[in-house]
Amino acid sequence: MHNVGLALDGAWKVLAAGLVLGAGLPLLFALGIRSLAWGAGGDAEVHDSGTAGPAANPAGTVLGWLLFVIVLALVVLGIVFIVASGFGKALSFEHIYPTLIDK
Amino acid sequence: MTESIILALVVVTALGFDFTNGFHDTANAMATSIATKALRPKTAAALSGILNLIGAFLSVEVALTVTNAVVKIQDKSGAPKAELLGNGGFDLLLIVLAGLVGGIVWNLLTWLLGLPSSSSHALFGGLIGASIAGLGWSGVNWNGDGSKLDGVVGKVLLPAVMSPVIACVVAAVGTWLVYRVVTGVAARFTDNGFRWGQIGSASLVSLAHGTNDAQKTMGVITLALIASGDWTDTSAVPFWVKAACALAIAAGTYLGGWRIIRTLGKGLVEIAPPQGMAAEASSAAVILASSHLGFALSTTHVATGSILGSGVGKPGAQVRWKVAGRMIAAWLITLPAAAIVGAVMWWLGHLIGGLAGALVVFVVLLALAGFMFLRSRRTPVDHNNVNDEWDADQAATRERVPEGV
């Protein structure tokens, strides 16, 4: 039954990585959209009926786009990861920022 | 001469399998984007096809030992077992041919029924069946040697049970978080934004699919070439094999398995753009993480689990568990069903023997494929009606006056 142990060992790692990337990135993306709405103000967000809604806030727009850029950068990293593993390279996070190394 | 014709049959059948693999799996990446109308159906299939083509060329890793996970027809270096190489490799070629036919037939049948089933399981099932028929029970690598995740149990059965659950959890958490964050935001912000997020994440799934799945066929064709003595290098795949496999999977993806796209996109859950993005992001993350960790899994199981999870995670969303149950039933019988077809094909080819046997197997494949294609024309599903309401006929039934009134 060694396979069951090995599979469970692999499964929790996949689950952990999946949660960080697969649920974390959509969360960042959603925060970006929320920020854009906050930046636009007015009808973009919930507000008391009869009022004009919150005023526009440029900081929200900036934050929103910043979050999108972060998500995009992480996705590009994902593509580099696929391509690199195809060419016998691997991504290393040894120096915090990603670098390509030989497998 | 005889060997060349059999080899040609194997190559053509392998490319045929690759093609069915393509259209079977368009849904995995694109069903959600099509259902939420983030992309027009044809555009989605074209985008996915192109990314599969690129993905297939990116996979330069040698996948020669692909069959070693489940059967014992190759040694560790990828060279075919010497005892199967009598009569110009005929024994090995027949096992491979029968296995491929098993995979194709099962893929076509599940497509006809609109069920997303795993193409890798169909291929492995066919090969297992043909190997049992040709070599006996010991011809199958059931459990590996204990050093790593291997064999039918470790590479096929356990990941098949675990991967949909993992994907479902990830997508449910993602969807729940997304809805928590955007509650109260105007729809013009959420719909447009999430559609873009969805297209991006679905593209990543397509690319990963091309790199993962096309190389299985590349490995099988190269194995056949080595067996017949037309290729000797076990550390590389001939370029024409790579190009042909890339084109076959891309063409299949572009054609689009609309019946399956419909089931995944409309049948399981009514998908809104935020759910679609969460589902595809979960699929992409789980596929990439597991291929990095050497955890073999099926794109189909992951994609289905993710879409299910996006229904579980959205407050108030309805999941059609009956449809999910049908799919899970299809997953359970994929391996044995493809194995039975593979075994029957091997016996057929073996009894008749030689070139005639291989030809008969091929003709039977063509006949079955033609039959299922004709059956599919009775209730065609294509890019025009792929997004129709799922419950249209059920709604009509409900309008009748209930009994006893």
Image (cartoon, coloured by chain):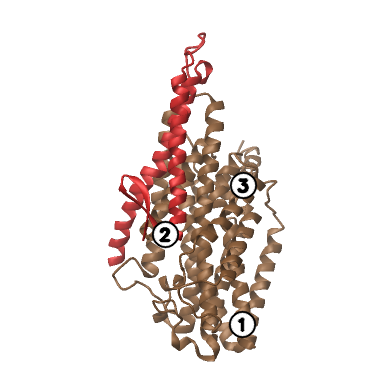
Q: Are marks 1 and 3 on the same chain?
A: yes
Residue B211 x %, y %: 50, 59
Q: Is residue B108 visible?
A: no
Letter of the red chain: A
Q: Which mark is residue B6?
A: 1
Q: Are marks 3 and 2 on the same chain?
A: yes
Q: Secondary structure at mark 2?
A: helix
Q: Earlier in the sequence, mark 2 or mark 1?
A: 1
Most foreground residue, B272 or B332: B272
Q: Secondary structure at mark 3?
A: helix
Crowd rating for badge 1 (residues with CA inside 10 Å; few <14, some 14–19, many 20+): many
B201 in relation to B161, above or below: above
- Image quadrant where residue B388 sits: top right
Indicate which label's residue lies in the foreground, 2 or 1. Answer: 1
Residue B387 x %, y %: 64, 43
- Image quadrant where residue A87 sits: bottom left
